[in-house]
Image (cartoon, rainbow, N blue to C red):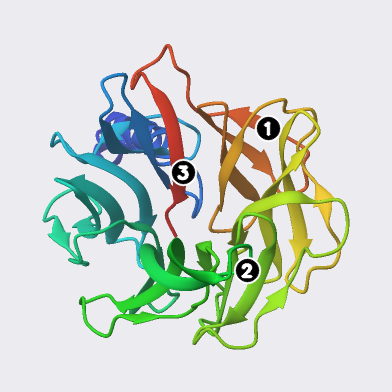
Amino acid sequence: MYDRRYSFAPLVILLASALVIFGVFETITKGTGRNGHIAFVVNKSDGGSGIWVMASNGAGSKRLTRDSFRNFQPAWSPDGTRIAFVSGRGSSQEIYLMNADGTHETPLTNNHGENLQPAWSPDGRRIAFVRNVYRDYMNPGYGHDGDGQFLNIFVIDSDGSGERELLGGSKSYDSPSWAPDGQRIVFSDGDDIYIMNRDGAQIKNLTGSGNLKSASFPAISPDGKRVAFTSFQGDGDELFLMNIDGSGKTQLTKDSKGSIFTPAWSPDGRQIAFVRNGEIERIDADGAKMLQLTNWLESPSGTKRDPAWSR
C-alpha cells in the first residue's frame, strides 16, 4: 500500500539542502560569527576615494559611497546601523553619518575646516574626532608669538550638538579610540600612545619608555584589556600589542619593510585588520595566522586603507 507519509520526503530533502546551501552562501558573504563586515576605503589613481564593505574573509565587496567626493576613514556605530566617515567636499573635510547600506548621508560637523578620524563612544551617543586648529603660541626658539597649526581631539554628540575640545596646547594629537566602558580614550601624538579620561583629564603616557619609535594608531580591544598600535622598527612599521596600562608590549608582525597603518579589532577580539603597503590584511591576535584580504589586481582596484570592523 502507498504510504502518503513518504510522498513529501523528496521535498523535505530538497528544502533542507537549499537551506544548507543558503547558510554556506551567507557565511561566505557575511563572514563567520560576530565578525561580519569590514568597511574600508579604496583610493583611485585620479585622487578620488570611496568607502566599500566586505566580509571578514575578504569576500563580497560592495561600494557604499557612489558620489565623486573624497570619502574616507569609516567608523561603525556600536549597533552596526550607521557609519561615520570623513568627506572632502569643496575646501573642507567634514564628518558625515550614513546608514550601513550607504544611504542617507548627513553632515555632523560644519566648521569649514579639517575634521578627521571619527570614533564612536560605546553607547553610540558621542563621537570623538580630530580637528585641525590654529593657535597663537610662544615659540621658545625665537621668543615671540607664532601662529601654530595643530591637530586636536574633540567630542561631539551623535546628533551634532555639544561639541567640545578635549586637549589644548602647542602639540598635535590624533587617533582617538574609546575604552568599552566609555570612560577613557587612548590617543597618539605621533611619538607615544596616551590614555586619558573622556573629559581630557588624567593623561598617562603608555609607551614613554623602551625602544618604540613613532608609536601611532592605537586601538583598544573590545574587552578593554589591550591596545593594538604601530611603531617604526628599523626598515618599516610593525604591529604591536600592549596591556591597557602600558605593560606587556609584544610585536605581532616581523620584517614588514614598509608602512603599517590603522589596526582595527574584530568584535570578538581574536583578530586585527590593518593596512600594509596599500592592502588590507588580517592577523590573529596571538600572531599565529595572517591573511591578505584585498589585492590590487582584483576588484575593487586601487590602494586600500582605513579598515573598520563592524560590531
Identify residue for label 1: 290
x, y percent for residue 209: 86, 63
Kindly state the secondary structure of the residue where label 3 is placed: strand
The quadrant in which residue 110 appears is bottom left
Local packing at callout 1 (Cα closer than 10 Å; few below 14, some 14-19, many 20+) is: some
Q: Are marks 2 and 1 in contact (CB under 8 Å)?
A: no
User: Which residue appears at 48% of the width and 72% of the height?
Assistant: 137
Q: Earlier in the sequence, mark 3 or mark 1?
A: 1
* Residue that sits furthest to the top in the current view: 297
Where residue 178 appears, as percent x and y from the top left, is 52, 72
Question: In 3D space, how far apart are the residues under numbered discs 3 and 2 (Cα atoms)?
Answer: 39 Å
Q: Which residue is mark 3?
A: 307
Name the foreground residue: 185 vs 29.
185
Instruction: Residue at 53% x, 58% y: name it.
Output: 267
Q: Amino acid at mark 1?
A: Met
Q: Which mark is residue 136?
A: none
Seen at 42% across and 25% down, the residue is: 303
Q: CA distance from mark 3 to mark 1?
A: 15 Å
SS under mark 1: strand
Q: How many marks?
A: 3
Q: Which residue corresponds to mark 2?
A: 140
> The N terminus appears in which quarter of the rendering?
top left
